[in-house]
Image: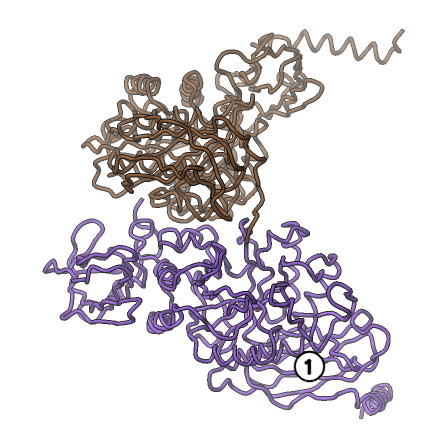
Chain colours: A brown, B purple
Amino acid sequence: MKPYRSRFRTHCMLVFSVLLAPALLAAPATVEQWGLYEVALKGPGDGNPFLDVRLTATFTDGERTHEVAGFYDGDGVYRVRFSPEAPGEWRYETKSNRWELTDKSGVFTVTSATGANHGPVRVFNTYHFAYADGAAFKPVGTTIYNWTDAPDAVQEETLRTLAAAPFNKVRMLLTPQPTAYREEYAPPRWPFVGTPPRDWDFTRFNPAFFQHLEKRVAQLRDLGIEADVILFNPYGRWGFETMDAATDERYLRYVVARLGAFRNIWWSLANEYDFLRTKTEADWDRLGALLQACDPHQRLRSIHNGRMIYDHRQPWVTHVSMQNGAAVEEPGRAEMYRGAWRKPVVYDEVKYEGSGPFRWGELSGGEMVHRYWCGTVAGTYVGHGDYFFTVREDAWTSFGGKMTGQSAPRIAFLRKILEESPPQGIDPIDQWQDPRIGGLPGHFYLVYFGREAPTAWTFELYRNALTDGMEFTVEVIDTWAMTITPVPGVFVTAKKDRYMFVDREGRAVPLPGKPYHALRIRHSGGAAPLPMVKAPIEP
Amino acid sequence: MKPYRSRFRTHCMLVFSVLLAPALLAAPATVEQWGLYEVALKGPGDGNPFLDVRLTATFTDGERTHEVAGFYDGDGVYRVRFSPEAPGEWRYETKSNRWELTDKSGVFTVTSATGANHGPVRVFNTYHFAYADGAAFKPVGTTIYNWTDAPDAVQEETLRTLAAAPFNKVRMLLTPQPTAYREEYAPPRWPFVGTPPRDWDFTRFNPAFFQHLEKRVAQLRDLGIEADVILFNPYGRWGFETMDAATDERYLRYVVARLGAFRNIWWSLANEYDFLRTKTEADWDRLGALLQACDPHQRLRSIHNGRMIYDHRQPWVTHVSMQNGAAVEEPGRAEMYRGAWRKPVVYDEVKYEGSGPFRWGELSGGEMVHRYWCGTVAGTYVGHGDYFFTVREDAWTSFGGKMTGQSAPRIAFLRKILEESPPQGIDPIDQWQDPRIGGLPGHFYLVYFGREAPTAWTFELYRNALTDGMEFTVEVIDTWAMTITPVPGVFVTAKKDRYMFVDREGRAVPLPGKPYHALRIRHSGGAAPLPMVKAPIEP
């Protein structure tokens, strides 16, 4: 029999539970692995819940434990969102400085992922990405800064365009950007309570704004698209770029609590961070470290530059999000930032395909595709933009809708080639020697000739993982016409000299003498590839 | 009248001074600013002075104070070396754990620098260098790894070659490198006491080795050449690459104490640091931080890579010392590492001019000169090597002597152009747009066409610092033939569009249709340059 004291405690807890039970609004019994599990609670709606109420929940399956911050969603409703990384039985328990919200607990079952749910994307193999279930993820991104603020019909059109487009990642601003378009059209939703253009109560978020954003993020997820959400931007006029440090931090924590459980979320701390003159680099270091510290889901994190490049070795940065169009004009440049930081390099902005009067928005479709290929063989990733300037500035990259340019189908063609390439990712084959060749030594090679127009390419590969008697098939790729033409026969390796292997009959691959062609070379038989030499083997 | 106690102290000190006076061997009454002032003391020669005896001296002119470590120079002689940065009266006082060496003090006068003494080189204007007296220093380096270990006659020949060569910086190893040459010739001096090849007493340095090295460093100084001394290297066989952490640190402190007061010293922590498999990156971080902490003269510090690039944002790194030949094949690449670390970038190894069987030593003279020019217009600096392979491997870059290649006179020609360029240094003019143009906006431009062979160049410059009506002279430079041909007349700026200025009559510069040509464009009159826009002015 339990001692009296314990029986009293049990009794009290029962009474409390009965008293407080109505607070639990919803907490489903099951959720899919990497799905979004949400505990909804009824709590105080008076005062300023954004400032006054603290709420967290601890989630555990016995092996893993996460403390997850909740958030106020208006109308006296509080939510805690969690995306479990493993199937099995999980439980949660809340803590709060309000009786109605604290000590709520529950149990739920996490079922295995189904369908296209591969989990969140992580850094993989130093320079690359993979889904949590191990499936390769090769970023093929586009930019649609303000699409969630466009008229609803345009947003729906954007989703239809994306469903048919090659992109698996979208860069999008969280707080809107002032544009010419916006002169005619003021968005109905703003992140803070108040009156546009600048009269905001920065202590009160506007749940409707975020609920809408979440709907769009979920729709991207269901299209298999990562949402690379930009938290700060320098395109000031609404005042979101001049908030004080405490407001910045509260904003960041609120966004993470709301959005972080969506498995397709990536955090981009800022766009063109160095153009935001109200913050120093120390501010970005602090906000980045906070982002790392306050996100129980550890989504991917980056910061995007204007002209000054951030110190991407900072531990909070998971991958490089680069603006530098010149860097992907040829693969020898594109490779260089990899070594500087030893992290994946995503050239998220390489200028846009477009017709604008600005130098950053006047790439031809061919040049956009060329930049994708340069980045690809260099072992990096490239992002797309489509900016055909009109009076209302309703370009894809500003507001979504339809794309105008010609690059997207060719990027789809490249994406298919990427998806057929090794899951380890493409790395430079002969570093600082022949930047045109990327791949996986001994297994897979892409050779991109760019603006060259060769009529033949002597079969010749760098020694790493090669030995005599390996057989390779070769295909000729027209990156613009989107054709893949097999070269008859197989090429069989023979050592040429200290560095290179050639075909044992000295064969060359005939080429059409036109620019923007590539080769795909795949191991097909004969001797097996040697183990890769990862470390340098020569001075 | 002084109290008794004080009189007693004075009396005792007098007695002590008389007793200990013989310890002071030398301490000159004057030294030139940035010269080498040395206090020599007689002390204990028994036991192991390298381990047992601690000696420092505090130097002050009342305004500045430096604590400087001394070192044991053999035969019971101890020295403290200091290079004063300001003229005036300075005093020193020693501290030691040995009576004979402690509390020695003296006064000396620092006179103004004379002749070619411009002081040590410092980082200047973010990406550039200057002497302490403000004179520009534009590094034009060469590599002679083992020259101080070559036969004496070769060393003397090396000095004669350098006296007639364009180089103002020499990269050289401190501990020797095993080479084929060394099979025939074992150097007479080794840094540690012991027996080659590997039987060393790492607790005892060999003063004769360092005395010889210092003589060579001083000779370089007198030729106006910076000595970029490489402290560790991976070319193991003697065991200097596998010393333990305590020995590494003692070695580093000893070298800094001996050499750091030479004003032409630069520290290169390691050559091809990542090929030194016995050390981790954390070891290099630690040794770099120690180098920064223990060097009262704060000489320039770098670390040179093989294939893995060091994190050059580390505070101890003053400038980037890069091995990457591909990076200077065109200026668009060369620029990229500047932004990654915002420090001066010196491409100390871009492969060598040579005839060797190795890919790192087979550049033509023309290619070496081309790489110098690419680096120059990109706002970086390039280093030379000359490696014409022979059976005995007595190439310039291994052992000095004579150079064989053809690039040196062309590098001399470029150096003269550099010395006539603005002291602020050359920076990219239109970042990530036209990498062929470097200079100082509104004042000075170098345009390098590389492998292009244009027959004309339309006068067109990026807007920064430009306004209408500025007059410029243009000269055509043949980088190989070493000719500078003025273009008749002046070019007068007129705004063309949002970004560019052209000549108001639309003039072009005629060019000979050959590769490796350049232009020098200098402001000569008309409207004055506008203030430079340092910050970005456009997205």
Q: How many marks?
A: 1
- Viewer-proximal residue, A53 or B515? B515
Q: Position of residue A181 (x, y in %)?
A: 24, 30
Residue farthest toward the left in the current orientation of the protein: B505
Q: Is residue B259 above or below residue B462?
A: below
Quadrant for the N terminus of chain B, please: bottom right
Q: Position of residue B64 (x, y in %)?
A: 60, 75
- Viewer-proximal residue, A35 or B429? B429
Residue farthest toward the front in the current orientation of the protein: A505
Tell me the residue at 57%/20% (across/down): A82
Q: Is residue A480 above or below residue A311?
A: above
Tell me the residue at 43%/23% (across/down): A210
| Residue behind mark 1 | B92
- Viewer-proximal residue, A227 or B268? B268
Q: Is residue B206 left or right of residue A364?
A: right
> Is residue A254 visible to the viewer in this orientation of the structure?
no
The residue carrying pointer 1 sits among few (fewer than 14), some (14 to 19) or many (20 or more) residues within 10 Å by Cα, namely many
Q: Position of residue A535 (x, y in %)?
A: 58, 44
Question: Residue A158's image quarter?
Answer: top left
Q: Is residue A27 left or right of residue B355?
A: right
- Element on which disc 1 rests: strand
Q: Position of residue B282 (x, y in %)?
A: 65, 50
Q: Is residue A19 left or right of residue B334?
A: right
Q: Is residue A13 above or below residue A378?
A: above
Q: Is residue A398 left or right of residue B49?
A: left
> Is residue A261 visible to the viewer in this orientation of the structure?
yes
Question: Residue A329's image quarter?
Answer: top left
Question: Residue B14's image quarter?
Answer: bottom right
Tell me the residue at 21%/53% (across/down): B500
Q: What amino acid type should be assigned to the residue bearing mark 1?
A: Tyr
Quadrant for the C terminus of chain B, please: top left
